[in-house]
Image (cartoon, rainbow, N blue to C red):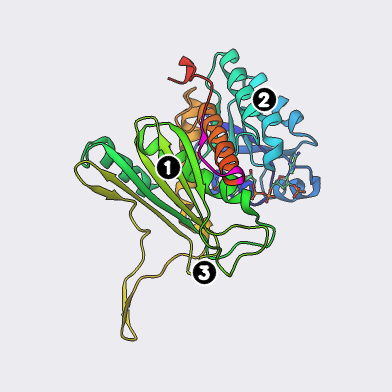
Amino acid sequence: MTLRVGVIGVGMIGKEHIQRIAHKLAGARVVALSDVNEAAAREVAATLPGAKVYLTGEELIAAPDVDAVLVTSWGPTHAAYVLAAVAAKKPVFCEKPLATSAADCLRIVEAEIASGRHLVQVGFQRRYDRGYRALKKTIDDGLIGAPLMIHCAHRNPTVPEAYVSDMAIVDTFIHEIDALRWLINDDYVSTQVLKPRNTKHTHSKLDDPIMVLLETASGVRIDGEVFVNCRYGYDIQCQVVGEEGIASLPEPEAVPMRRNAALSTAIMQDWKLRFIDSYDVEIQDWIEATKAGRVNGPNAWDGYFAAVTADACLKAMHEGGVAPIVTSPRPTFYA
Ligand code: NAP
């Protein structure tokens, strides 16, 4: 059976997911599109034989020939579309964030539990990255013993002028927030945000770099650097220190060169290329799991946990000190 997918939001990532479903992946077809910019939706639809354009996301969700929904619109619109999909009992893949407030994420969690079916997946694609998976397997296999500390970094060469301090948490570090918790099967209990001296390459509305400290329930300590004007490249680092050894996220493949009296390896500049393969694996897995009636990837609870953690990081960043990370008890539905 071919999964008939409706996509809400045909911006940058929406178009990419549509292209991968249409031309790279197996088992699904994009049959419906919707975007506040109707002309943009019609332009994309013209490239997809038989795809219909709906004027609202709600109409697309209700369409009888839409089996599953992909939400790739602007973040603040996510909660309403995900809730509508859950109410219609349709599986929904929602790009991160699941919702822009923890309260809305919790509403989604409660609605999904009430529906009695696992329907919601959140677009935290690092869980599908080959390097992160290899690192997780190393930890899960016990090769470095119990994790004690994690040192990580999320660096961009530059960011646009519109990028402000809160975005370092909600748009950038949010990926570490989800990936690290999954990596070591542990939940966070507190956070602190330290602000070193600013780089001269930042502006008045952006503290850059920052360091996010997280503490987990089992006592693992994490230091995460976010440095979005680092100049030299897009660079994701993660080193897990365990009782018996240390394991690191593999570097992306690149050809080492001996040239001009130097030994060098290129560092990526574009964040999109760093995890490009993981998006393919992620959406293919979502297609297959959806057809089997499951959610394999990050679920609504993970989306909620990330939102609560991000809120605590923002509080710590704005008010100083240590902020507790307190969630509702985890429902057995997500055990
Ligand atoms: P984008 O290029 O701005 O695309 C968003 C699209 O949604 C635009 O076409 C926008 O139309 C449309 N839209 C806005 N409000 C809408 C509504 N109420 N109903 C339907 N469509 C609406 O943004 P993007 O970069 O693709 O990001 C989209 C989402 O994906 C964001 O939540 C972002 O955080 C997430 N994302 C995740 C990753 C990842 O690594 N997992 C990477 C990139 C993006 P207008 O342009 O006319 O407003």
Answer whether residue 321 is magenta in the image: yes
Pick whichever of labels 2 and 3 is earlier in the sequence.
Answer: 2
Q: Residue 87, how many percent across, how many down? A: 67, 19
Residue tagged 1? 128
In this view, the residue farthest toward the front is 321
Choose the circle earlier in sequence order: 1 or 3. Answer: 1
Q: Is residue 97 left or right of residue 80?
A: left
Label 3 belongs to which residue? Answer: 231
Q: Is residue 276 left or right of residue 109?
A: left
From the image, tell me which residue sits under label 2. Answer: 83
Disc 3 marks which amino acid?
Answer: Arg
Distance from Cα at disc 1 to Cα at disc 3 = 27 Å
- Which SS class for mark 2? helix
Residues in magenta?
318-325
User: Nearest the camera: 268 or 31?
Assistant: 268
Q: Residue at x 34, y 86 (%)?
A: 260
Image quarter hosting the C terminus: top left
- Residue 1, relative to residue 247: is it above or below? above
Image quadrant of residue 148? top left
Q: CA distance from mark 2 to mark 3?
A: 40 Å
Name the kind of residue labelled 1 in the image.
Tyr
